[in-house]
Structure formats: C-alpha cells, structure tokens
Image (cartoon, rainbow, N blue to C red):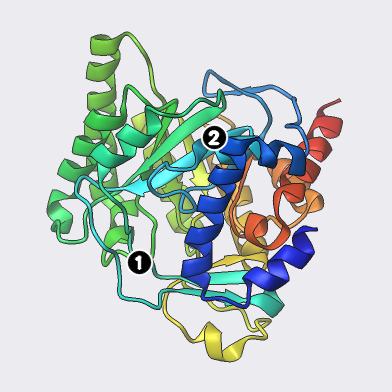
Amino acid sequence: MYSLIKRILFFFDAESIHNFSLKFLSFANSTGLLKLLVKKRIESPVTVMGLEFPNAVGLAAGLDKNAQHIDAMAQCGFGFIEVGTVTPLAQPGNEKPRLFRLVDDNAIINRMGFNNAGVKALIDNVKQRRSNCVLGINIGKNKDTPLQDAVDDYLACMQQVYRYADYITINISSPNTPGLRELQHGEGLTSLLTQLKDKQEKMNRQYQRYVPLVVKIAPDLDEQEIEDIAARLLSADIDAVIATNTTNSRPDSLSCKELAAEAGGLSGAPVFELSTHVLSSLVKALHGKIPVIAAGGISSADDAMKKIKAGASLVQIYTGFIYSGPGLINDCAKALKNSIK
C-alpha cells in the first residue's frame, strides 16, 4: 500500500508534500485510522544512557522539526523520537527550493537551514504529547548568531528544553548553517562541551533529574579528526554520540547527476558506507566507554543489523522512512529483537 501512496506523493513538490504528509499522519492518528494502517510497535526494550527504550529503532531529527507529530510518529512504531533541530528564536531557514528527492538513488538532498518556530513553540507542542516513547530534543544555533557566541544559543535552548527531554542532542554537524561544523574541532569543541556539561550538572541539581547530553557528528571526517573528537567527548564525559549527520560529498554512484549538483546535505542509501565507516572508527576510538547511536543510510533491516554489528547501541531512520514507510521501522525493530534473542 505504501508503495502506491509513495508514487502519488512523489508527483508533488518535496517540501510541500513532506508537510502535508506529516499533517495527514497526525490527523489519521487522532481519528484512530493510523492504528489500523500500521503494525503494532515491536516491544524489545534496551537500556542506553540509563534510559529504557521500547525498541532500538528511532526517528532521526529533521523530520519533525517543531515536535508537532510526536504521537503519530510513535504510532508508526518508533522506539524513540528525536525532534528539532530547534533554535532559540524562530527562523525561516534557507530559500526554497531546498529539498530534493534523488529517487533512483533512494536519497535526499536538503539545505533547509534549521527552519523552525523557535524553542518556546516546540515546548508548547511537546507538552501536548501523549505517547510514552523516549523523546530526544535536538538543539542548534540561530544562523545570525556569530560562531564565537554559539554556546549562548545552545545553553539557552538547553535551559528551555531540559525538563521536557529524555535526552538532548547537540547538533554541531549540519552542513546547512554556515561555519557550524567548525564547532566539531579543537579547543572550541572542548569549550562548548565543558560549558554544556556544567549547565547539565546545575539543572540536574535544580530539577533532580539527569538528562543525558548527546553530540551529533558529521560523516565527512578523516581518522585523525574522529580520534580527536572521540578524545574530547571522553574528556567531557558526554553521554552518547550520534554518527552521523548528512554528507557534503557526492558519491560517483549517484545516478541523478543533475540533482546531485544541488548544494546541501545528502542522506539516504548512498551515505550508508561512509556513515558506517565513521561509526566503526568512532566506536574503536571511544573504547566502548560512550554509546553510539547510528544514523545514515538505513534502508533495510539488514542495514540496521550492520550498524549494530559495527558497534551501535541504537539506530535512527529518516530518509529510509520517506522511501519505505512504517514497514521499515517494523522490519528493523523485529530484526534487532531477534538478534538480541
């Protein structure tokens, strides 16, 4: 059924139909229709970062930027959902068109640019959720905030979302905010992480509730960069890391050559090998001391299994969900459950 629906949806502009589809899913969930159309969530609890996840398959950030569709996503079978990226102030993002489907490659290029309604609007939406899945909130900096002041934006977002998140992801790896990836390197990264961990400690004391901090990194890193980042994550006692975000690279295997020339981050099947290589190198550099959440190119249950075998504790899906629908979530969760058994 989803294959037929996808053919119809893909006739329309990518961003417009993206927004329509999310609204329709929420409508279908509110009327009880969605429950009849999707399989029941696979229950296969796994504990990571001190949190119990209903299953190991999550929704990656970027799909539900303003946390408007949490309950619908949970009904689709995800064990955890990450919303955002959210910034302190609302911002429109980059000019349209900014979202492109590379259908023959099962891939997407986006240069959305952290378009979102701001952190206060996101919190209002989070307060209305009814699902009991684990919720991550992904935070970033506003485009107009100078890079040297980026930590102020992260701290402001963290202050706002701390009480409502099960974990908080620090997005320093989006390719669509100028200069953002510079925060992944050197003493700038150490300074950022130190200040965020200090804030976490203060808020833990204030609310008597420890909310793990997760860092999301790019796939466009060499071995030395991965080792340096790993050392700084270990030194800062970060709770987990997501590997990886989208890539600026364009594999020669891409068949949609014209669209491949579009600026932005590439996600989907063509990113799988690159992302999994970074995952493996990162797991090795962390010596098993920090759990890794794998994202990037998961298009099948076998892909999810390969991420786990490479050392991941959890997996996240975005582009695969667009191309394969809720069935992919069920397949991945079932495969991982059977693997654990």
Label for residue 176? 1
Which residue sits at x=67%, y=33%? 56
**Is residue 252 in sight in this rendering?**
yes
Q: Is residue 172 left or right of residue 245?
A: left
Marks 2 and 1 close (CB-CB < 8 Å): no
**Is residue 38 in sight in this rendering?**
no
Q: What element carries label 2?
A: helix
Q: Is mark 1 on a helix, strand or loop?
A: loop
On the image, the x and y values in percent for residue 270 come to 65, 70
On the image, the x and y values in percent for residue 42 come to 76, 31
How far apart are the two marked residues, 2 and 1, measured between alpha carbons?
A: 28 Å
Q: In this view, does 341 lie above or below 251?
A: above
Amino acid type of the residue that numbered disc 1 sits on in the rendered structure:
Asn
On the image, the x and y values in percent for residue 51 come to 54, 20
Residue identified by numbered label 2: 71
Amino acid type of the residue that numbered disc 2 sits on in the rendered structure:
Asp
Query: Quadrant of the image for the C terminus?
Result: top right
